Every structure is written in structure tokens, then in C-alpha cells.
């Protein structure tokens, strides 16, 4: 493998000159420039990204902080983001916070040490103030932890509203909302959208908080068994909805004839598991591409037309609603 | 944030001297050394990893090449590897090959440019010879593309054997094996282990090839509907098994009374979906930790006691077998 020294020797110039040409910095006269480029080509020289990085203070690495890798929704989102980032000639460093403030601190140091060009925060970080101090472009997905950090989120209020309308128009009178931790903004917004419809129609409902990553099938079963008159269920994730459908089977209640169920996310699983799930679809392609596009604008110091993006969700009607 | 220049100024030495102390290279007398270390401590100086990397030809970055991020098995494995790597003070660069030779070539270049310290290959790369030329430590998981590259794989032969024994001992006489693409070594080994048992007992069986990432539910349904006398099914993944169980429901055949089903992987999903799946469990914790441990030995130029590791699989009996 040839080095910058080989190129310099071949082109009869100094290493500093080669560096100036490669990094398009400083003055180099046109003939010298051409000699260097010819030598680069002839020797098939690949500049070391780390050396470039030091010079340009750019690493071409994008970091993404996720709360978990085993969540189906995050895995699908990460797949899309990796593809977009690599196509733009960046690399993806994946950092798993495990929702642990200590791990987050560790990553903070890493981001600084590696001249990370930008950061996509999918995790609900406990250290947003420290992250802001990093002075690297940040885009949030799913969260909106700070007004000045650009974000891309699903329109969660709309999601709750669409689910409620579908259940109410399908004749449901007593509805359970299995939701995520109610201190999360996403969950709050879904709940508000959901209740806004039910309140107008004076329909009884209650919410039950569950963990997003490992919602307890047992708890869902208990709630369903102790509410035999429930006729509609809205879940904050498809995995919760699959648990609910299985609990309804145990309770010998027919889906959708006696109880209608709506999930959230539209993960692939919703199309494997039968009955196929009616669900609120989050547009992962759009979320990923808006996030990456916004981050690139920040990296290139371009103006943002819009700081916060809310991506519309849609109701996908399948076989668990009437 | 303080720089190496600040440290040099504070310690009244040159930048080169600070660099020698930090990287433990070259001679520095003991008092000077102490002055530098005091200055580092006082200024809370964090050396730039990229600068160190250039000097030491080490980046403390481990790359992992995966074929897909949306496969539940890979997502769970990646979660474990990320944790192990970060705890050893390395970072993880995730590269998604999408099983595309062109994308693989792109990554080859990246690995070189970033002084990647080591590479974990989970993907079935089309360019193994090019990867070998990289001259960085490589460990393979799930594959064994080249004799000289250390590997960690499940004992797939044992997996096939355990599944066949369970079905045969449970009285199955006509068995279907829904497997992955039969040109993959993992699939070949499972098939051999599976058939070794059935052959001895003279039991009828046939194999049907499917895609691992998106096995077609429709094809599985067709095969099951056109084989109404089948009484045992072995699947190369839990997702295939879940499809099979749903197809059996459509065919109005009881699981496990009339047809017994065994999956492979033991993903979390196998414990969400009812009836809970009997499956061959791949020990992801062990696979991840052997792979990372082997890679670290290669990076540190230590001797390997063993080049190829086969990790035993186990049969997890749940509710889809008798």
C-alpha cells in the first residue's frame, strides 16, 4: 500500500504539498497540483481518513446512540440509517446506551475523542446538557429533549387520535390503552391524542403503563382477564398488541368480533403473526431520511428550513379491527 | 478543552515530548515524564484518539460486518457484542453488507482507511480473499470461509441431530425440514445432523429451502397444506416455525397433538408467541464472548489455544412438542 511519502516522492514535491492538494487547503499552483494528482492515481494512493480527520477536524463518522438493539422498531430504523449514512460516504458508529447514564457518559468521551462529525440520538439520554456541550451537530429521533436540538418524531398525537377514532367508530364502548412509560413525551402525546377523541364521545377508558422493551405478557393477561367487558384495546407497540391478542385467546374472547385491537409501529412481525394486526404505522424510511438530511445540513453549516419535523403516521387496517 | 500544546506549555516541554510520554514510545527521563503526567492531570487533558491512532496505528475501533440488521437473531447477537467491545474500551463500527458484493468492497476500503483494529465477520462475504489481504485480525461468526481465519460457530450438526431425535422419539413418521438456503455451510451441517438420525430409523423426510431473512409464509402454507400426513416439522429459524404453526392452524391441525414443531435460534419472540416454541437454542452470549476474546488475542498478538470454536446448542422444550 502506498503512503503519502511515496506520492510526494513520485511527484517531486513535499508531503505538505500533497496534503494541501488532497485536502484542498492552501495554495498549490496548477501544474504541481496536476503532478500530485497523477502520482495519486498512478500509485493508487488511498488517503488515510484518520490523517485527514486530524487535519480537517472531520472523521466522516456519524454516531448513533440507541437505547437497545434488540427492539424490533429500533433495529429496522437503524438498518435504514446505516444505509443512508454509508451512501453519503460516512461510517456509522453504533452506541447502545442500555438506558444507563454511566454508559452514556462513557460515550460522551468517545464522541469527543474521535472527532465524530454528527450524532443521531434515538435514546432518551439522561445527559442532554452534556451532549449539547460537545459542540457537534445533533439530531434527535423520537424525542425532543431540548428546543434547540433539531428533531424528527412521528406525529404521536395523530397516532393516538387515529386509533381512538377507529375503535370508537367500530362501536367500542370500554377501551384499554396499554401504553409505554407515561413519563416519555411520545407516550404522553399518544395518550393525549387518544383521550381527545374518547372524551368528546364520553367513552370509558383507562391506561396501563408497561415497559417498551419487555412488556410483561403476564400483566397484560391479568388486566384483560379482570376486564371481561372490555371491547377495544390500543397498544403503544405491536409487541404489546401481540401479547394482548394471545391473552384474549386465553380469555376466550374473539378478535375482532368481541374485542378490537390496534398496535403501534408496524414492525415486520405485524405481518407474520396472525391475525394480521391493525396498527399505526411509523414511517421509518421518512424518519431516517429526514434525520440524516437534517444532520448533513448541520454538518455542512447550511440553514435549516425547519428545526422540528413531525412525520405523519397512518392507520394500517388489517384483521384485528372491524 | 485543553490540547496537547497546553500540556506542553504547562510542563515546559515540547509537544513531541508530551506525545512520547502519552504513547509510551521513545526515551523520556523520569522527572520530565512526571511533569508531563502532572500537567495532563491538572489540565484534565484527554488525548485525541485519532492522533494516537495515527501514531500507534491503532484506532480502538472494531468493525462488525453483518448481512442484515433486521434479523432478530443478528440484532440480539450485535447487542451482546457491542456491550463486550465497549467494556474493553473499544468502539463498534457497524457495517451492513445487505449481502451485496459492491457494499462489501466499499467497506473494505473503509476498514483500511480507519486503521480498524479488528473485524468480526458475521456476514457470508463474497470477498473473503480481499478481506484477508487487509492484514487486520479477523474472526468469523456463523461461517468458516477460510481455514486460517478463526471462527466461532454453533454446533449446527448437533442442532439438526437434537431436533431429529426429539421428533422421532415423540413418534413422528413423516417430517418436513424447512431450512435456509442449502448452499450455506450452517444449513448443510444442520441438514446432515438431522438426516443422520432419520436415516438410521428409516424415517421419511424432505427438505424445503427458504430465505432466512424473509421466509415466505405463503410457501410454508402451501407445503403444509399439500402434505396433510406430515406429523413433524423442523425449521432452521424460529420465524419459519412461527409461520409453520400459523399454517397448521389454517390446515386445522393441532400442535403438538397431531404435528410437532421445532424451531432454531431461540430468539425472544419464541417466548412471546403462543404456543411457546420448542427450539434449538444458539448460545449468543457464548458466541459473542468467544468471538471478542479471540479477536482481542489476535490484536494483542497472543497465541490462540484454539482457532475454531464450535459452541454447543441445546434443545429447549416448550409447548410445540410432546
Image: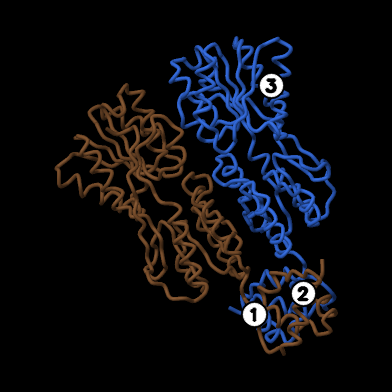
Chain colours: A blue, B brown
The CA span between labels 2 and 1 is 32 Å
Q: Are marks 1 and 3 on the same chain?
A: yes
Badge 2 is on which residue? B40
Chain letter for mark 3, please: A
Tally of numbered discs: 3
Q: Are marks 3 and 2 on the same chain?
A: no
Q: Nearer the viewer, mark 1 or mark 3?
A: 3
Chain letter for mark 2, please: B
Task: Residue at 39% x, 63% y: name it.
Answer: B145
Badge 3 is on which residue? A194
Q: How crowded is mark 1: few (under 14 residues within 10 Å), some or many (20 or more)?
A: some
Chain letter for mark 1, please: A
Q: Nearer the viewer, mark 2 or mark 1?
A: 2
| Residue B270 found in image quarter | top left
Q: Nearer the viewer, residue B128 or A241?
A: A241
Viewed as shown, does residue A290 lie left or right of B232? right
> What element does badge 2 sit on?
helix
Find residue B4 and report its horizontal and vertical position in percent. Answer: 79, 75
Viewed as shown, does residue A95 lie left or right of B312? right
Q: Quadrant of the N terminus of chain B?
A: bottom right
Find residue A112 and report its horizontal and vertical position in percent. Answer: 74, 62
Q: Nearer the viewer, residue B183 or B254?
A: B254
Task: Residue at 33% x, 52% y: name it.
Answer: B156
Badge 1 is on which residue? A3
Amino acid at each position: 500500500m502506498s503512503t503519502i511519502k511515496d506520492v510526494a516522492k513520485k511527484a517531486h514535491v513535499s508531503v505538505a504539498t500533497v496534503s494541501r492538494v488532497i485536502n484542498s487547503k492552501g495554495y498549490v499552483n496548477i501544474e504541481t497540483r496536476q503532478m500530485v494528482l497523477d502520482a495519486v492515481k498512478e500509485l493508487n494512493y488511498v488517503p488515510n481518513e484518520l490523517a485527514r480527520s486530524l487535519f480537517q477536524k472531520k472523521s466522516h463518522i456519524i454516531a448513533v446512540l440507541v437505547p437497545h438493539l434488540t427492539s424490533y422498531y429500533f433495529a429496522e430504523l437503524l438498518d435504514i440509517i446505516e444505509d443512508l449514512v454509508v451512501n453519503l460516504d460516512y461510517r456509522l458508529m453504533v452506541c447502545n446506551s442500555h438506558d444507563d447514564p454511566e454508559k452514556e457518559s462513557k460515550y460522551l468521551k468517545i464522541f469527543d475523542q474521535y472527532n465524530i462529525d454528527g450524532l443521531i440520538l434515538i435514546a432518551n439520554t439522561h445527559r442532554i446538557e452534556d451532549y449539547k456541550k460537545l459542540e457537534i451537530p445533533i439530531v434527535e429521533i423520537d424525542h425532543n429533549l431540548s428546543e434547540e436540538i433539531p428533531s424528527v418524531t412521528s406525529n404521536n398525537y395523530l397516532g393516538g387520535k387515529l386509533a381512538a377514532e377507529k375503535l370508537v367508530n367500530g362501536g367500542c364502548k370500554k377501551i384499554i390503552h396499554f401504553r409505554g412509560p407515561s413519563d416519555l413525551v411520545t407516550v404522553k402525546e399518544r395518550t393525549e391524542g387518544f383521550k381527545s377523541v374518547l372524551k368528546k364521545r364520553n367513552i370509558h377508558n383507562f391506561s396501563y403503563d408497561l415497559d417498551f422493551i419487555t412488556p410483561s405478557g403476564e400483566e397484560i393477561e391479568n388486566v384483560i382477564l379482570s376486564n371481561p367487558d372490555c371491547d377495544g384495546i390500543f397498544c403503544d407497540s405491536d409487541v404489546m398488541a401481540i401479547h394482548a391478542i394471545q391473552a384474549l385467546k386465553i380469555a376466550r374472547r374473539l378478535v375482532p368480533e368481541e374485542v378490537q385491537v390496534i398496535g403501534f409501529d408496524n414492525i415486520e412481525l405485524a405481518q407474520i403473526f396472525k391475525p394480521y394486526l391493525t396498527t399505526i404505522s411509523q414511517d421509518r424510511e421518512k424518519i431516517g431520511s429526514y434525520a440524516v438530511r437534517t444532520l448533513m445540513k448541520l454538518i455542512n453549516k447550511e440553514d435549516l428550513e425547519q428545526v422540528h419535523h413531525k412525520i405523519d403516521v397512518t392507520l394500517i387496517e388489517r384483521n384485528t379491527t372491524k
